Image: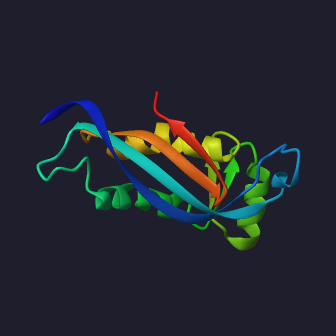
């Protein structure tokens, strides 16, 4: 049955990563880590034959797999911060992920919404309509589609 409204489902994925915000006016300009929690919401006008937007395990497999491979236990840096990335990787062999913008929660969430989700879910009859990223238990950003 097609509905005149979108139905959404949300999956939460947690990961640990380090980052620094270049030119931050306070201590976030230093390399530091967070226990991030990402919530991705997907929408559809038509449910699948079992009555779901998408099986939660599909989100875990695809988006959780991407997070695990690229961001979990990684240092996330602005791609203009390659000198620091090379120094870290040279000493610790730490995996570095270069974001095309300063790795603020806002930019990280937008990257997932605009780049990662379309690549992972683009051939499915669902759309990622919101990404919420908790940088700490008390601080999060919401990036809606559109």
At horizontal 37% and vertical 61% (from top left) the residue drawn is 60
Q: Is residue 57 left or right of residue 73?
A: left
Question: Nearest the camera: 144 or 138?
Answer: 138
Estimate the x, y position of residue 88 in percent, counting from the top left: 75, 64
Question: Nearest the camera: 69 or 125?
Answer: 125
The N terminus, quarter of image:
top left
Estimate the x, y position of residue 117 in percent, counting from the top left: 41, 44
Q: Quadrant of residue 75?
A: bottom right
Residue 112, above or below 96: above
Residue 53, above or below 12: above
Q: How many marks do you count on the picture? A: 0
Residue 146, above or below 117: above
Estimate the x, y position of residue 37 in percent, counting from the top left: 55, 59
Question: Nearest the camera: 91 or 15?
Answer: 15
Q: Is residue 69 left or right of residue 78?
A: left
At horizontal 27% and vertical 38% (from top left) the residue drawn is 44
At horizontal 71% and vertical 64% (from top left) the residue drawn is 33
Residue 119, above or below 93: above
Estimate the x, y position of residue 120 in percent, counting from the top left: 36, 47
Q: Quadrant of residue 7?
A: top left
Question: Nearest the camera: 5 or 40?
Answer: 5
Q: Please name the colour scheme applied to the rendered image.
A: rainbow
At horizontal 35% and vertical 61% (from top left) the residue drawn is 61
């Amino acid at each position: 049955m097609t509905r005149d409204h979108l139905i959404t489902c949300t999956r939460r994925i947690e990961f640990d990563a380090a980052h620094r915000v270049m030119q931050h006016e306070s201590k976030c300009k230093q390399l530091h880590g967070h226990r991030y929690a990402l919530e991705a919401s997907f929408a559809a006008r038509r449910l699948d034959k079992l009555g779901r937007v998408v099986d939660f395990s599909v989100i875990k497999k695809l988006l959780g797999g991407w997070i695990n491979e690229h961001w979990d236990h990684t240092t996330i840096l602005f791609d203009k911060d390659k000198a620091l990335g090379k120094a870290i990787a040279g000493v610790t062999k730490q995996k570095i992920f270069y974001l095309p913008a300063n790795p603020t929660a806002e930019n990280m969430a937008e990257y997932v919404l605009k780049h990662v989700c379309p690549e992972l879910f683009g051939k499915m009859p669902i759309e990622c309509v919101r990404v919420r990223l908790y940088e700490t238990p008390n601080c999060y950003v919401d990036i809606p589609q559109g």
